Image (cartoon, rainbow, N blue to C red):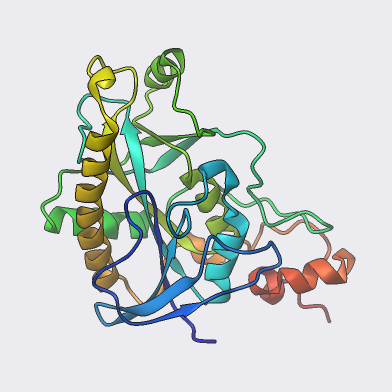
Amino acid sequence: MESVQIGIIGGSGLYDMAEVTDRSEVTLQTPFGEPSGPYVLGTLRGKRVAFLARHGAGHRFSPSELNFRANIFGMKMLGVEYILSASAVGSLKEEYAPLHIVIPDQFIDRTKGRISTFFGRGLVAHVGFAHPFCKVLSGIAFDSGTRAKATIHKGGTYVCMEGPQFSTLAESRLYRSWGADIIGMTNLQEAKLAREAEICYSTIALVTDYDCWHPDHDSVTVDMIIANLMQNAKTAQQIIAGAVDALPYERSCECASALKYALITRPDAVPAQTRQDLAPLVGKYLQTT
């Protein structure tokens, strides 16, 4: 199977990357089930990439239904070392207006019952997650957005809520009181799993509207949100293409060795099936003499 270094996950509105050429599709089976759909392999700015539509063809999967483990494990199986994720978000601050872009650097977890780890079943690991996004990759994405003349903000806290319903007014006000900046439903699990898979991960957060705290929120229509999604998708494609162009082949960040000191279980105590299933992640660390 072809090895691809760069993965792209498209969210609401970004179901394809028009600039990708030499396309083929690969369907993967992972130890965690099926990903959201086939990975589209192709060439973008002279580099091989793998594109995955997070919500499936036709936007069939809600955030709570996504098989995050399969999606990220599939990227690992392809050899991916960088994931650029695009996501629609609501704004919790006046200064982050619709059509703005945010490159967040922190998370608050408000999800319920989602599986956010590859580990368990006889193998325990605790990765560091104080800084949940790759600083290097996020910096490259921000620089690309600046070059694309997007209104882009560097840093910010992304509240990841369960959904699929949007926030209550009380919740929206609470998140603002915490100093949070944007709110979405998908990226936290991707970031946690990418860290466990030693994949650099960054989010390009595309503001579609203000969350319900804003006095103008009630005048927002579905048509307005869809129009913003489509406009954001064009901007996101420019930012992603520019970031892909600038990505270094060799990684110098800590993401590449996130598991080095994270595995707690004694290697000879790891069950054979778990060892086999997680070989793409932990094989190099579970060498027994």
Say whether residue 149 is visible: yes
Residue 273: x and y, percent? 83, 70
In the shown orientation, is residue 136 left or right of residue 163? left
* Residue 249 in the image: above or below residue 234: below
Decide which of 169, 268 is in the foreground and name it.
169
- The quarter of the picture where the C terminus appears is bottom right
Q: Against 25, is 1 above or below?
A: below
Is 183 on the left or on the right of 216, as rendered? right
Residue 153 visible in this rendered orientation of the protein: no
- Quadrant of residue 195 within the rendered picture: bottom right
Task: Indicate the quadrant where residue 162 lies.
Answer: top right
- Please identify the quarter of the rendering in which residue 139 is found: bottom left
Residue at (63, 33) in percent of width and height: 112
Residue drawn at the location 52% of the way across and 49% of the way down: 61
Q: Position of residue 81 (x, y in %)?
A: 47, 70
Which of the image's four quarters has the N terminus?
Answer: bottom right
**x and y, in percent, of residue 149 in the image:** 10, 52
Question: Is 287 or 71 nearer to us in this picture?
Answer: 71
Q: Residue furthest left?
A: 149
Q: Which residue does the image show at 44% across and 57% down from the upper left?
A: 201
Question: Which residue is located at x 27 percent, y 32 percent?
Answer: 209
How many discs appear? 0
Compared across the picture, whether 56 is left or right of 224 comes to right
* Image location of residue 24, percent across then percent down: 42, 82
Question: In the rendered image of this protein, does residue 137 appear above or below residue 153?
Answer: below
